[in-house]
Every structure is written in structure tokens, then in C-alpha cells.
Amino acid sequence: MNQVRAARPSAWNLANALTAGRLLLVPVFWVLLMHDGGSHARWRVAAFFVFVVAALTDRYDGELARRRGQVTDLGKIADPIADKALVGAALVGLSLLGQVAWWVTVVILAREVAVTAVRFAVIRHGVIAASRGGKAKTLLQAVAIGLYVLPLTGLSHTVAAVTMGLAVLVTLVTGADYLLQAVRLRRVSERTAARKAARERSREVRELGERAP
């Protein structure tokens, strides 16, 4: 028992530190973005660089944890929370500033909350690996948000709008795919199979008891 506990990776590692750093950067990003109603280009540019740094930690914390064998329960919980906090703060802030339509913010955040809830609901059955679509969604969201954070006008703003449209589309498609994968995982997992076997044995026992004189 002690040996099993000792084999568990410590929560104090670089991957979790990057995740914590991302969480700490969220309020910094918010203050920079919302300063004086988002009207100053320098503050918006500063907010952009903070967002980029935070987004990069999302790129590397999971990779480091897997490479070093430091995947922890804390990391599994904190990582998606940090991701949603960063994206949520950016989208809500941009909507408050009138940069991004509220329906875009609601659609993206509703999808993220739903997927996170499903992830926790099926975590005992297994882990759904990140798909190419999911990675494309994350990249498109980050690029689109980053472009909107910058004080762009003209053609550059059009590029930002098109990128955000693609991000919303991929967000919805990958969300539906994730839900389907979760349903299949729950249906075929070892945990579900064990429960079915236990119920079958219990039913057989009851039937034998009913047949006994």
C-alpha cells in the first residue's frame, strides 16, 4: 500500500506550476484588456502578449506532464479549469467591449462547460484522447481571440472575424464528436462491463433462489 502511494507523482512539479501560472495570468490579462474601456492601444497590446504567454503554458504543461510521468489528479482538474478561465475571461471581456458578439461567447463557453462536465462524468471509465479536431479548435480559438485583443482595423479585423467564425464552427463540431466519444466510452469501458457482469450474477442468484424448493 505504501509502495503504491510512493509511486504516485508529486503535485509539486513544473507542469502544474505552468498551469498555476496560467491561472494567475488571467486577472492580469483582464485588467490590461479592460483598462479604460479597452481604448488604449498600448494596453491592448500588453494584454495580447499576456494572453500569448498564458496560451503557450497550455501548450506545454500537458506535454511536460506526460513526458516526465508527472500526470496528477490535481493537474487533470486544474488544467481544464485554467483553460476555461483564460478563454472565458477573454471572450467575456471582448463582448463587454463590444468587440465580439455575445452569442459567440455564449456558444463557445457553453460548449466548453458541457465538455468539461462530460469529461469529469466519464473519467472513471477512461480518458478520451485529444483529437486533431480538438487541437485545431484550441488553436483557432487562441488565434481568433488574440487577433480580437489587438486593436486591429480594416482588413486585419476582417481576418479576425473570419478566424472567429471558423473557431465557432470547429468548436461545435468537435463538441458533438466529444459527446459521442464519451457515450461510446461509457458503454464499452471495463467499469461498465464489470457492472453488467455483477448485475448478471445477481440476477442469476435471484433466479436460483426463486427456483429453490
Image: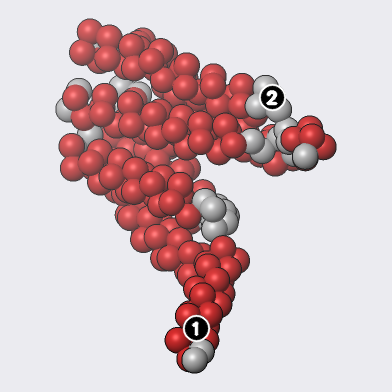
Between 147 and 137, which is closer to the camera in this rendering?
Answer: 137
- The quarter of the rendered structure image containing the N terminus is top right
Q: Is residue 2 above or below residue 194?
A: above
Residue 69, given in percent of the width and then of the height, sits at 75, 39
Q: Which disc, if any, is residue 38? A: none
Q: Is residue 151 above or below residue 91?
A: above
Locate residue 103 relative to residue 22 in the image: left or right. left
* Badge nearest the viewer, 2 or 1: 1
Residue 52, given in percent of the width and then of the height, sits at 49, 26
- Of all residues, the one furthest to the right in this rendering is 3
Locate residue 1 relative to residue 122 in the image: left or right. right
Residue at x 53% of width, y 80% of height: 205
| Residue that numbered label 1 is attached to | 209
Label 2: state its secondary structure.
loop
Residue at x 45% of width, y 47% of height: 120
Mark closer to the chain start, 2 or 1: 2
Q: How far apart are labels 2 and 1 at the CA level? A: 55 Å
Residue at x 21% of width, y 29% of height: 95
Q: Residues within 10 Å of mark 1 (few under 14, many from 20)?
A: few
| Residue that numbered label 2 is attached to | 13
Residue 59, given in percent of the width and then of the height, sits at 58, 36
Between 176 and 47, which is closer to the camera in this rendering?
Answer: 176
Residue 167, given in percent of the width and then of the height, sits at 36, 47
Question: Which amino acid lies under the numbered mark 1 shown in the image of this protein?
Answer: Gly
Question: Which amino acid lies under the numbered mark 2 shown in the image of this protein?
Answer: Asn
Residue at x 48% of width, y 70% of height: 187
Label 1: state its secondary structure.
helix
Q: Is residue 18 above or below residue 184?
A: above
| Residue 87 visible in the shown view | yes
| Residue 181 visible in the shown view | no
